[in-house]
Image: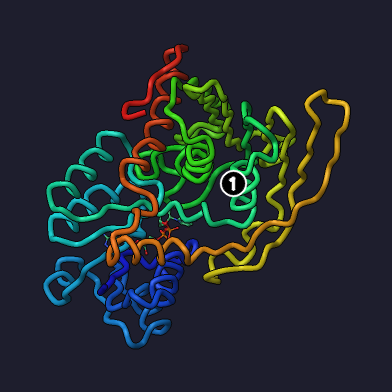
Amino acid sequence: MRCAVIGYGAMHNFGWAHSAWIDHTPELELVAICDRDPERTAAANQDWPQVETYNSIAEMYGACDLDLVSIVTPHFTHCPLAVEALGAGKHVVVEKAMCLTVDEATQMVDAADAAGRTLAVHHNRRHDGNYRRIKQLVDEGAIGEVFHIELSIGSFGRFDHGWYSEKAKSGGSFYFWGPHAVDWILDLVGEPIAGVNGYFHKLLWPDVDMADQVRAIIRFEGGAVADVCHSRIAAHSKTLWRILGTRGAISDTGQGATSGYEHQISAPSGGALTLTRVDENGHNRTSEEVPYLECDWYTYWQEMADHLLHGGPVPVSGEFGRRVIGVFEAAERSSASGQTEQVPYE
Ligand SMILES: NC(=O)c1ccc[n+]([C@@H]2O[C@H](COP(=O)([O-])OP(=O)(O)OC[C@H]3O[C@@H](n4cnc5c(N)ncnc54)[C@H](O)[C@@H]3O)[C@@H](O)[C@H]2O)c1
């Protein structure tokens, strides 16, 4: 499979990361990198001297025979670039956040259907070592039936991070770290969403047009509830994960979970979570530290190759990615309406 990366940005070195993951996957061949900024294609030339670089996507499509493109550009460009690539007959991996709105997500899904090509969303952090361990423990029933999840990131400080801090370009405060958080929750619970309540606060930094704190409470059809919060006005922070089940709980700080993330294709486990188990009467309680699994970030790409070449499942489909965007939109609508809001394609 002949692959190209579109977007070789310096902010998180993530065009490099996509190139490295593709290069590491035996069935995938990195043949081209495109960034409209000549300084970034010069960097790509240094990193990957054997690969063609382009400053125009049209020029790259004219010159290269490509099977798959990976889109690693700012969020507001994801929908138009993905629809263009699918229309040109390429399979697409698009970075998180998939796009800005559910309408855009639907345009992308429809474009993939019309072209008979695959659209996959790069929710690669399902391969973080702490999440992999959490998923393993929950799936094997280590804490019984999960009914409550809290997932929070908080700090105190003005958000100043290039285009990420402009709502029209990024989508808003939920679209930075929120795609990882909501993808984890939807993957872990695996049930339709019954409704979302949102609470957005805009109290400080009037020059930043994004909420200072966003919170979504997601209710699932089976009764489980997840509370996800990203705050820039939290002078005290909470632990990253707190998961309650009928036979125990998991808490995790996430400390060390992603060390080396933007410079390595995999990493050893960097920490441990706390697992507490209780017996059915709640009399006996034991707690232990459980080490994270390895961060196997390149696995996403092996799954993508297996899908394209051998008919395996899509690592994360466009339809799944659309649910994540649907949660952000429903939370924002709910914050304004004061009502529980529904997620289309729940
Ligand atoms: N999955 C993760 O863990 C993770 C981590 C970091 C970034 N990301 C995502 O990666 C994407 C890119 O983020 P970033 O931090 O690398 O941003 P960035 O601004 O550093 O890089 C974006 C690059 O895209 C280029 N670009 C923009 N429009 C283009 C176009 N039409 N054609 C060609 N090139 C174009 C820019 O010149 C820039 O070099 C975002 O979706 C972001 O959320 C994901």
Q: Is residue 146 left or right of residue 280?
A: left
Which image quadrant is residue 16 in?
A: bottom left
From the top left corner, tell me how far across and down residue 113 is, in percent.
Answer: 17, 47
**Residue highlighted by disc 1:** 135
Compared across the picture, whether 138 is left or right of 94 comes to right
Residue at the outermost bottom position: 50
Residue at figure coordinates x 31%, y 77% from the top left: 29
Q: Quadrant of the C terminus?
A: top left
The image quarter in which residue 307 lies: bottom left
Kind of residue at disc 1: Lys
Write the residue at 68% across / 63% down.
269
Give whichever of 21, 212 is nearer the camera. 21
Image: 194 above or below 213: above
Picture coordinates of residue 212, whole percent (x, y): 55, 33
Is disc 1 surrounded by few (<14), some (14 to 19) or many (20+) residues within 10 Å?
A: some
What is the x, y in percent for residue 222?
A: 51, 23
Quarter of the render that holds ligand 1: bottom left
Q: Secondary structure at mark 1?
A: helix
Measured from the top left, where is residue 149 in percent x and y? 62, 32
* 114 w.r.t. 324: above or below: below
**Residue at (82%, 23%) from the top-left corner?**
281
